[in-house]
Amino acid sequence: MNASQHHAMDTLAGHYLLEVPRDELTTSVRRGCHLDLEQAFGRRAPLAIEIGSGVGDSLTAMSVVRPEFNVLAFEVYAPAIASTMGKLDRAGARNVRLISADGAEGLRELIAPGTLAELWTFFPDPWPKKRHHKRRLVQPEFAALVASRLVEGGAWRMATDWASYAEQMHRVCDGTPGLVNAYADHPGGWAPRPDRPVTRFERRGLDAGRTVRDLVYRRAASR
């Protein structure tokens, strides 16, 4: 970390960074552990989660305009977390907490079924080589986990600039019981761009000539 990141970690972690029990890996979340979100945020409010918040550009912008939400973000890289805390502080975003852990494990262990209002997964690692596609976050098992955690009508917002990953997201979510495409009547089923800024990862994809695709799936009402 650079000097400003060290300063952010020293001065802001007490407010923004939550500690959770670990297993062997430093980014793991111990099975069966519990997180009191009402205590962590100091209030009860609808919950949004971002998995892979990076340096916090989307997280900061989207949290500021959603003051009615508690926003929980998972990120594993300490310098990115430190940069994020600095941006949140400068923007006056007090409704955000960060956890340095694997987001899929955090979602599984820390979030109760039927309690998540929104999930954001913007530009997750595309693992572009075909032999590595199994490492991609959006897989049937993960989609089923997301469906179980969302409230009825809750939204899973996704974006990627890799065509094969966009199609995989589409295919996986279409095949997941309980999830419905909120923009199924739009061309290709793709969603309009939400209120997130153009991050450096997105800019890199655009500069390379790739098309950014957004998807929104919602938790269907129980019958």
Image (tube, rainbow, N blue to C red):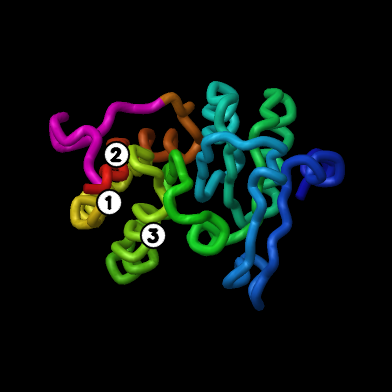
Q: Mark 1 or mark 2, which has the lower sequence index? A: 1
Q: Kindly report which numbered mark, 3 or 2, lies closer to the viewer in this rendering.
A: 3
Question: Please, what secondary structure does the residue beneath circle 2 have?
Answer: strand
Quickly name the residue at label 3: 145
Using a 10 Å C-alpha cutoff, classify the residue at mark 3 as few (fewer than 14 neighbours), some (14 to 19) or many (20 or more): some
Q: Residue at x 43, y 33 (%)?
A: 203
Residue 105 makes an appearance in the image: yes
Quickly name the residue at label 2: 215
Q: Kindly report which numbered mark, 3 or 1, lies closer to the viewer in this rendering.
A: 3
The spot of residue 120 in percent (x, y) is 44, 42
Q: Is residue 78 above or below residue 201?
A: below
The spot of residue 218 in percent (x, y) is 30, 41
Q: CA distance from mark 3 to mark 2?
A: 17 Å
What secondary structure prevails in the magenta region? loop
The spot of residue 128 in percent (x, y) is 34, 58
Q: Residue at x 73, y 25 (%)?
A: 90
- For residue 123, which quarter of the picture? top left
Q: Is residue 39 left or right of residue 196?
A: right
Q: Mark 3–mark 2 contact, CB under 8 Å?
A: no
Using a 10 Å C-alpha cutoff, classify the residue at mark 2 as few (fewer than 14 neighbours), some (14 to 19) or many (20 or more): many
- For residue 53, which quarter of the picture? top right
Q: Mark 3 or mark 1, which has the lower sequence index? A: 3
- The amino acid type, in three-letter code, at marker 3 is Leu
The spot of residue 89 in percent (x, y) is 74, 30
Quickly name the residue at label 1: 169
Q: Mark 1–mark 2 contact, CB under 8 Å?
A: yes
Magenta range: 179-194
Based on the picture, tell me whether residue 190 belongs to the magenta stretch. yes
Front residue of 116/127: it is 116
